[in-house]
Image (tube, rainbow, N blue to C red):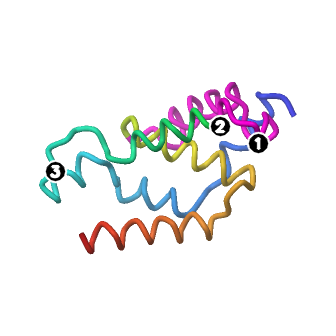
Amino acid sequence: MSTSENLCSIEPVEIAPLAKIVERHQVWSHMAAKYGVENPVPPWKTSLDGICDALDQGGCGPEILSFVDRRNEEDTLSATVYSNLPYPENQLVSLAHSLVARGVIDETELQERLTGIRARLEAG
């Protein structure tokens, strides 16, 4: 499948947990203000960069998600489906979208991970 075919097939896929993030406008600036955090950089940004680097250089190969496909999908999804989110949130949800659309992680597992993160945040 060519990159342009990938983009056409990935963009219209709706991923419920990610749609909720967009609907609620869950962005770091709002969360930081709510919890009194002054750091403008989300704590998950370094993990996101690491995941992207690992995908780009990893041994899993381009059949999972090549550098070019990842960047093209990120650009397309950030400009369309996730255009209401600021950077780096749109980068994060675009990557999650690509991974769910490709079957690397399923929606149920994504929702479970998001629920776990929320529980830790609210307990802290």
Residue 96 on image: x %, y %: 57, 49
Q: Which residue reaches farthest top?
A: 68
Please report contact status of discs 2 and 3: CB closer than 8 Å, yes or no. no
Please report contact status of discs 2 and 1: CB closer than 8 Å, yes or no. yes
Q: Which residues are magenta?
A: 56-85
What mark, if any, has residue 16 been given in the picture?
none
Which residue was labeled with disc 2? 55
**Secondary structure found at label 1:** helix
**Res. 77 image quadrant:** top right
Does label 2 or label 3 sit earlier along the sequence?
A: 3
Amino acid, disc 2? Leu
Residues 60 and 31: in front is: 60
Residue 44's place in the image compared with 118, above or below, is above
Does label 2 or label 1 sit earlier along the sequence?
A: 2
Residue that appears at 34% across and 53% down? 25
**Secondary structure found at label 3:** loop
Amino acid, disc 3? Val
What mark, if any, has residue 64 been given in the picture?
1
Q: Residues within 10 Å of mark 3 (few under 14, many from 20)?
A: some
Q: Specify whether residue 63 is painted magenta.
A: yes
Q: In this image, 69 relative to 48: left or right?
A: right
Quadrant location of the C terminus in the rendered image: bottom left
Residue 96's place in the image compared with 16, above or below, is above
Residue that appears at 57% across and 63% down? 110
Residue 62's place in the image compared with 11, above or below, is above
What mark, if any, has residue 37 been given in the picture?
3
Residue 23 on image: x %, y %: 41, 57
Residue that appears at 66% across and 49% down? 99
Does label 1 or label 3 sit earlier along the sequence?
A: 3
Quadrant location of the N terminus in the rendered image: top right
Q: Residues within 10 Å of mark 2 (few under 14, many from 20)?
A: some
